[in-house]
Image: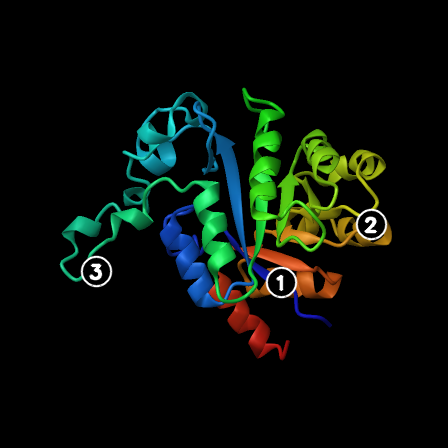
Amino acid sequence: MNRPQVVAHRGASHDNPEHTLGAYVAALDDGADGLECDVRLTADGHLVCVHDRDLRRTAATKGIVSTMDLAELDQLDFASWKNPWRDLDDEAPDRDDRLHRVLTLRTLLEMVADYDRRVEVAIETKHPTRYGGLVERRLVELLHHFGWDRPGSPARVMSFSWKALQRVEKRAPGVPLVQLVEHAHLWPMLSRVIGPDWLVGPGIDELTEHKKLGPRITSAGHDMHVWTVNTPTELDLCLQLGVKAVITDRPAYLLELLDDRGL
């Protein structure tokens, strides 16, 4: 039984505001092998690490990411939603606001590139979006800037859209691709259109509910990167299935569980 790669989902997001620099610093401090992020394109062409199309949940505004410039997003607080009572806690440490503003993908990749050990990055492009394939084009351009658009790259690209992944494959055939699977019943169709060397990323709930899904994916010759794995039971299922990477909100906890299992 091999030890899977532990990838921090939106950073160490169980304890920190997701997609903030602080969450990713915490994940690296925890020892995460990789970092996962979602990216969206701003109105002025910057890729930012934000999951939702609007900002009501994480920045308390009705603004839409794709209609706002980076400078506008940079004025927003992306951290207070996680702990709205923080200002009333006299024992809370002082907060460095630089760690809790909107995070550009470039900044995240710069941190990874400068880190003192290899860290991999799983980048999910969100669709549908008003910018269509421009998202993947900008992403490949940024990966090229870092020299990460070729075999051996620490970056991989994920999406629920197989067309989006095909766009990346065309522009950067050396970058690993992960076809995300939200519903088990979609696998027979996806299995016919994805590349033979693509990775597959099913959700842990689907693997749990549909016992045949995992074996069907592996028997088709695809390694699995599974989201979002946060409990001992979920981890054990992934270990039984030979999953290559587990994407988790709790990287420190999963690393501890793996150590306890002698892996």
Between 257 and 194, the residue placed more toward the observer is 194
Quarter of image, res 27: bottom left
Q: Is the residue marked by circle 2 packed among few (<14), some (14-19), or many (20+) residues within 10 Å?
A: some
Circles 2 and 3 in contact, beta carbons < 8 Å: no
Between 203 and 263, the residue placed more toward the observer is 263
| Image-based side of 97 in relation to 87, left or right | right
Q: Is the residue marked by circle 3 packed among few (<14), some (14-19), or many (20+) residues within 10 Å?
A: few
Q: Is residue 58 above or below residue 236?
A: above
Secondary structure found at label 1: strand
Residue 75 at x, y percent in the picture: 27, 33
Q: CA distance from mark 2 to mark 1?
A: 21 Å
Work out which quarter of the rendered image holds the C terminus and state it: bottom right
Residue under the point 71% across and 29% down: 163
Checking the image for residue 5, the label placed there is 1
Q: Which residue is mark 3?
A: 93
Secondary structure found at label 3: loop
Residue 240 at x, y percent in the picture: 73, 65
Question: Label 2 sits on what residue type?
Answer: Arg
Mark 2 or mark 3, whichever is nearer to me:
3
Q: CA distance from mark 1 to mark 3?
A: 31 Å
Mark 2 or mark 1, whichever is nearer to me:
1
Q: Which residue is mark 2?
A: 216
Secondary structure found at label 2: helix
Circles 2 and 1 in contact, beta carbons < 8 Å: no
Residue under the point 27% across and 44% down: 80
Work out which quarter of the rendered image holds the N terminus and state it: bottom right
Circles 1 and 3 in contact, beta carbons < 8 Å: no
Quarter of image, res 184: top right
Q: State which tag comes first along the sequence, 1 or 3.
A: 1
Between 54 and 34, the residue placed more toward the observer is 34
Q: Is residue 249 visible?
A: no
